[in-house]
Amino acid sequence: MGWRGDGSGRHPLATPPLEWSETKNIRWKTKIGPNKYSSPVVVDGKIFVTADPARLVCVNAADGKILWQKSNDFADLPHAVTERPLLADAGNTTPTPVSDGQFVYAVFGTGIVACYDVKGERQWIRHINLKTTTEYGRATSPVLAGGKLLVTLSYLLALDPKTGNDVWKNPSVPESYGTPVVAQIGGVEVLAMPSGQLVRVSDGRLLATDLGGLKFASPLVQDGTLYLIQTGSSAQQFSATNPDKWTVKQLWDQELEGTFYASAVYDRGLIYAVANEYKFHILDAQTGKLVASLDLEFPMPAGRLGAVGANLYASLALAGNHLFLCTDLGDTLVLAPGRQFKELKRNHLGEGHGGSPAFVSKFIYLRSGQYLYCIGEP
């Protein structure tokens, strides 16, 4: 499990509460420390989160107690290396960890990658000395697939999860802000990259290129179709003319209004997307036609001098039969999926949500400011 669960943002078995506040449906609240954008990951009763300046933290999902926390700074490396300055906007702890239930893997903006077992014993740590190529710093989360740890640091690399050693690298697949999505297409395990490329997991070979790419968000893959949702959106299908080269058929393209930091989510033939300018869009996944498009409203925070409006950084989530849309000022809209916009609840909590929530059973695990919350009915 990693960013957005399996990367899709869908949690079909979850039955979370629809209403909460600082005084309602809060099971526990634990101070983790500052972090702008990383999301929690829940595996077998443990929550893994990152916190500044370079910590990986493990929290007991039942009661919120911190079980262990480990530093992953340059001083923690086995050999001295020259430190690289960080770009301020994304910081050092934006990538979300990933875990297979036995081990947890974390990537930091410095290029440090580390592996721990779930008890907190470090297995390995290394610094990948590659230049950051994105303007605002590193944001791509690691992915586990095909017995490999996939990280994007300047370009795409596959590491051996047991040792951290290189397995393969592909300098033709560039670093971006979004996270790749693992998919089975035509019986082949592939990575759908935010840069608009399909990469074979087994050896890093490019199977399809020049598919458009995303500036900030992550792609969607559903039933063999790749969806790239942003201002210039598209849907594309693939067929394997031979094992090493695939042909691409574009199904549709659609122009949407706004800047898309949040990744979209697919549900039963519809795609839901939200732009940072508060534009909410519903698209027909088969045709790309706009089913609905409307303006959301978020009040300016009261009592804050020089306050600015909310940003929509957290990606959309579908938990059970409800959509969840979070802002970095602490609002969460609960929506009913369907061809018409229907807001059911609007909740406010804490200092704001830059990362996406995690959903397990009847609970929501949500990062807000320096705190991690467990939201659930008594």
Image (tube, rainbow, N blue to C red):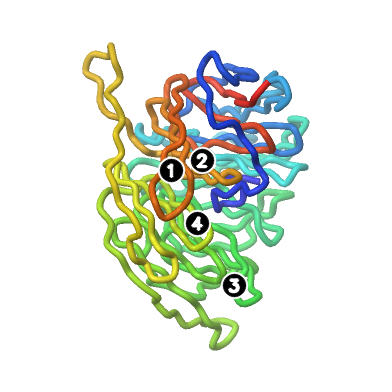
Quick one: 250 or 297, which is closer to the camera?
Answer: 297
Q: Amino acid at mark 1?
A: Arg
Residue at the extreme bottom: 241
- How crowded pointer 4 is (Cα within 10 Å; few <14, some 14-19, many 20+) is rated as many
User: What secondary structure is found at the residue carrying circle 2?
Assistant: loop
Callout 4, which amino acid?
Tyr
Residue that badge 4 annotates? 266
Q: Residue 94, how many percent across, how many down? A: 48, 37
How crowded pointer 2 is (Cα within 10 Å; few <14, some 14-19, many 20+) is rated as many
Q: Position of residue 378 (x, y in %)?
A: 68, 20
Tag 1: Cα neighbours inside 10 Å, few (<14), some, or many (≥20)?
A: many
* 337 lies above or below 171: above
Separation of residues labelled 4 and 3 (CA atoms): 17 Å
Nearer the viewer's eye, disc 1 or disc 3? 3
> Of the residues tagged 3 and 2, which is closer to the observer?
3
Q: CA distance from mark 1 to mark 3?
A: 28 Å
Label disc, if present, on residue 138 of the rendered structure: 1
Given contact means CB atoms under 8 Å apart, are the residues at marks 4 and 3 in contact?
Answer: no
Residue matched to label 3 = 185
Of pointers 3 and 2, the one earlier in the residue sequence: 2
C-alpha gap between disc 3 and disc 2:
26 Å
